[in-house]
Image: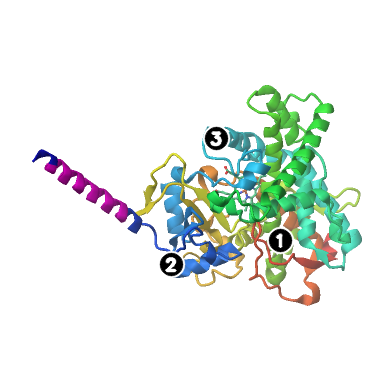
Amino acid sequence: MEPLIVCACAFMVLIVLLRRRAGRVQCLPPGPPGRPIIGHLHLLQPPLHLCLHTLSQQYGPIFFIKMGSSPAVVVSSPFWAKEFLHTHEHDFADRPQFEASKRIFYNNRTLVMMEYGSLWRHLRKLYTVHILSSKRVEMFENPRLEEMALSIKLLENQMCGAVVDLRKLVFNTVGNMMSRMLFSKRSFDVSEAADGGECRFKELVERTAVLFGTPFLGDLVPWLSWLDVQGARKRMDRVAKELDKFFEEVLVERIATSRGVSEEETDADYLDMLLRIYNEDGGMDRDSIKCILMDLLMASIETTTTAIEWTLAELLNNKSCMMKLQEEVDTLIQGEDAAVLNGSGKCLVRDSQLTKLGYLQAIFKESLRLHPPFALNLRQMCKALDTGIKVGGYDLPKKTRVIFNLWAMARDTTMWGANAGSFCPDRFLNDGAPDLRGHHYEFLPFGTGRRGCPGMSMALTVAPFVVANLVLRFNWETPDGIILDLSKEASSLTAPLATPLVAIPTLRRSSQ
Ligand code: HEM
């Protein structure tokens, strides 16, 4: 009799377990039917944020897909964004690990891609306290002013009345600002916007961005990674070698000419600061320094350039906003001490004046809302949660990725009103309008929480600074006065305009 009872109990336990398991599967968020091995990859087309937006209209503000063998939920509403980034903030503080990051960034040692844990915490503190604090950003104003002045002179002397490739000009200007802040060198050639040439380092940065922007089959279906049908590993290794060589040379040269600086206040650039920390703190090695330099360059140039390019494109299409902004900048410059352009006696708006330009701030926020450079933000469930967790009533398997569709959230009419899709900076002039601190889940261009962008104050200084000075000095027109089609976007690491922005500058009378 006894063995029979044991068997019956075991049977019942099995039924309960199986039911639970079945229940768990039923509690996944809704989603389209998938296929074996590839999951839902066949449904995903570039630009991914547009494709995911279309799917969200059918399956709702949270839906489940499999990117190859990786489970993922796509979040397209502020309500669900808050659920993951506030209620479960700690649980989703990880990022997926990618082959490109392993090979190019010294086995995932950049802050952006690093696995959540004690190493990440250590590095994050270094970034927020020392590298990207507002005080540090302020300290490096001079190289930014000088680079802006150089680009303006180039425009005045060689490009007035001509068609200017604004994407190139802005990319190189921002790139030089960053590389001068980092290691006191100009690494990009602004004149290529005038003569069509290409700079070798820029080409390297762009190749890196392409490798990160192109899905690698092995990241999606790990057991097929040995195939490497795309030949991507070879390209990653080549880029890794060239980047390492570039930064190794920078490092060797600096160590050879070391100025023996030891006081924080006298650091001439970030490299000085990192070498000082390297000497003081045995925890940092040579690769860490190269990796931080790469991280800062890669995380900043393309994002900031994309943000500026979209802002200028919207201004070209919205003439009344452009004129209102020019009036605001003119009034500021006439009333205050501005920086003087070398030798010419002409003025530049300075960092410290940016907060006085309320309309510029509203324009920049509105541009970030409609065109967040990272249209999709990516997180992953922390590794420690090895049985998965429940979120908002849904059961999510371990290592679920969360894709926040920031682009779609900006078009949510329940949050932004009937004109959600229009460029309307005035909405940010209202009291109580969302700010960028990450508490308004409908507006997260810099993300939020412990993995939110630590470079926000740098970006909010550099991007509006470039826009203010370009519209202060010049009037801008599209070739033949055409209205730009801003509905088309390219698919890259960020989400820029489908084709590079071009425009014709003419010198403004008021700035002469
Ligand atoms: C308009 C310009 C920029 C935009 C829109 C932007 C946006 C973002 C976003 C959405 C994230 C992910 C946040 C999250 O997961 O919650 C991020 C992370 C990051 N950003 Fe930015 N960013 C910009 C500029 C910069 C700059 C100028 C730097 C540095 C100089 C920078 C450094 C980083 C780093 C290091 C991370 C990774 C943080 C971590 O994972 O702990 N970003 N950024």
Q: Mark 3 points at which residue?
A: 121
Which portion, as a residue range, is magenta?
4-23
Say which label, 3 or 1, has the lower sequence index: 3
Residue depth check, mark 3 versus mark 1: number of the one nearer the observer: 3
Q: Position of residue 425 (x, y in %)?
A: 61, 64
Which numbered circle lies on residue 309?
1
Q: Mark 2 points at which residue?
A: 59
Q: Which amino acid does label 3 sit on?
A: Arg
- Tell me whether circle 3 and circle 1 mark residues in contact (CB < 8 Å): no
Instruction: Name the residue located 51 percent from the left edge and 36 percent from the top edge.
Output: 117
Is 98 on the left or on the right of 311, as rendered? left
Category of crowding for the residue at label 3, using alpha-carbon neighbours closer than 10 angstroms: few (below 14), some (14–19), many (at least 20): some
- Up the image or down, 510 lies above or below 435; here it is below
Helix, strand or loop at mark 1:
helix
Give the CA distance from mark 1 to mark 2: 33 Å
Q: Position of residue 400 (x, y in %)?
A: 46, 50
Question: Is 13 a magenta residue?
Answer: yes
* Observer able to see residue 141: no
Say which label, 2 or 3, has the lower sequence index: 2
Q: Where is residue 136 in the image (x, y as percent from the top left)?
A: 68, 37
Q: What residue type is labelled 1?
A: Glu
Q: Is mark 1 within 8 Å of ligand 1?
A: no
